[in-house]
């Protein structure tokens, strides 16, 4: 019954769960094989594919790495139809409540494009770490619109304030942290290598 309640309350998570299951099936992998490739437990993968839990940003990042996609590409695959224009009220919003992270896909969804624009919001104190990029060499432009954001890429640490923009190529671990006292809102432009 719990699964049916989740499917009814969050259609994005339900479509995402179905797509993740489909990607695994397309490759002919068992849950065990995917667990080995991603470093995510079989039980977590199973619960995610059945929409019993909403995946975290870190978990989606690991799965995107295995499947060779950015998070925006994956999320665009669960949208009904690509369009050249997407109104603000129709943009996909995904939330990692446990981490205090809200992600809005600003660009019209299309899996074949190399660039995309995302709006990110972190609550004060939120701290999200990614062990590696979903696609090695991914180019990111991080433009802080409101608040402050600490970004760590490899050994380099950057404190960004409102109006600051950081450009980087991502090859290894990254970390996004909102030092507070208020939340942060930023635009993230992502370009595939």
Image (spheres, rainbow, N blue to C red):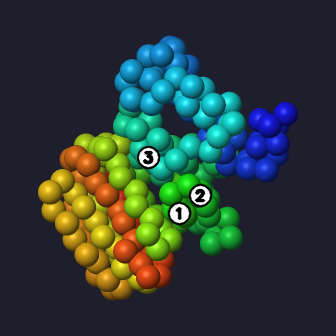
Please report the residue visible at 45 percent of the width from the left and 65 percent of the height from the top. Answer: 126
Residue 84 visible: no
Count of numbered tags: 3
Task: Give how far across and how far down residue 77 sits, in percent.
Answer: 57, 43
Task: Give how far across and how far down residue 30 sits, in percent.
Answer: 51, 14
Residue 169, quarter of the rendered image: bottom left
Q: Earlier in the sequence, mark 3 or mark 2?
A: 3
Q: Is residue 55 above or below residue 103?
A: above
Please report the residue visible at 56 percent of the width from the left and 43 percent of the height from the top. Answer: 55
Q: Which residue is mark 3?
A: 58
Measure the alpha-carbon separation of dots 1 and 2.
5 Å
Q: Nearer the viewer, residue 93 or 85?
A: 93
Q: Earlier in the sequence, mark 1 or mark 3?
A: 3
SS state under label 2:
loop
- Asked if disc 1 and disc 2 are in contact, CB closer than 8 Å, the reply is yes
Q: Which residue is mark 2?
A: 97
Position of 156 compared to 11: left or right?
left
Q: Specify few, some or many for label 1: CA neighbours under 10 Å numbering under 14, 14-19, or 20 or more.
A: some
Residue 16, quarter of the rendered image: top right
Task: Give how far across and how far down residue 179 sits, in percent.
Answer: 37, 74
Q: Nearer the viewer, residue 114 or 44?
A: 44
Extreme residue toward the left, this view:
155
Residue 34, quarter of the rendered image: top left
Q: Nearer the viewer, residue 129 or 189?
A: 129
Identify the disc placed on residue 144: none
SS state under label 3:
helix
- Asked if disc 1 and disc 3 are in contact, CB closer than 8 Å, the reply is no
SS state under label 1:
loop
Quadrant the N terminus occupies: top right
Q: Which residue is mark 1?
A: 100
């Amino acid at each position: 019954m719990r699964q049916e309640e989740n499917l009814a309350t969050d259609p994005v998570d339900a479509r995402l769960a179905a797509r993740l299951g489909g990607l695994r099936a397309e490759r002919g992998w068992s849950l065990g094989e995917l667990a080995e490739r991603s470093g995510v437990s079989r039980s977590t993968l199973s619960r995610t594919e059945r929409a019993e839990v909403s995946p975290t940003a870190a978990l989606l990042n690991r799965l995107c790495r295995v499947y060779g996609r950015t998070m925006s590409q994956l999320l665009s695959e669960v949208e009904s139809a690509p369009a050249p224009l997407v109104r603000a009220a129709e943009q996909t919003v995904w939330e990692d409540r446990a981490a205090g992270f809200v992600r809005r896909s600003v660009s019209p969804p299309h899996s074949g494009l190399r660039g995309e624009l995302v709006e990110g919001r972190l609550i004060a104190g939120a701290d999200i770490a990614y062990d590696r990029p979903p696609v090695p060499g991914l180019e990111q432009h991080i433009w802080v619109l409101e608040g402050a954001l600490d970004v760590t890429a490899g050994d380099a640490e950057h404190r960004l304030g409102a109006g600051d923009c950081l450009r980087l190529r991502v090859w290894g671990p990254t970390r996004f942290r909102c030092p507070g006292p208020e939340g942060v809102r930023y635009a993230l432009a992502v370009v595939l290598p």
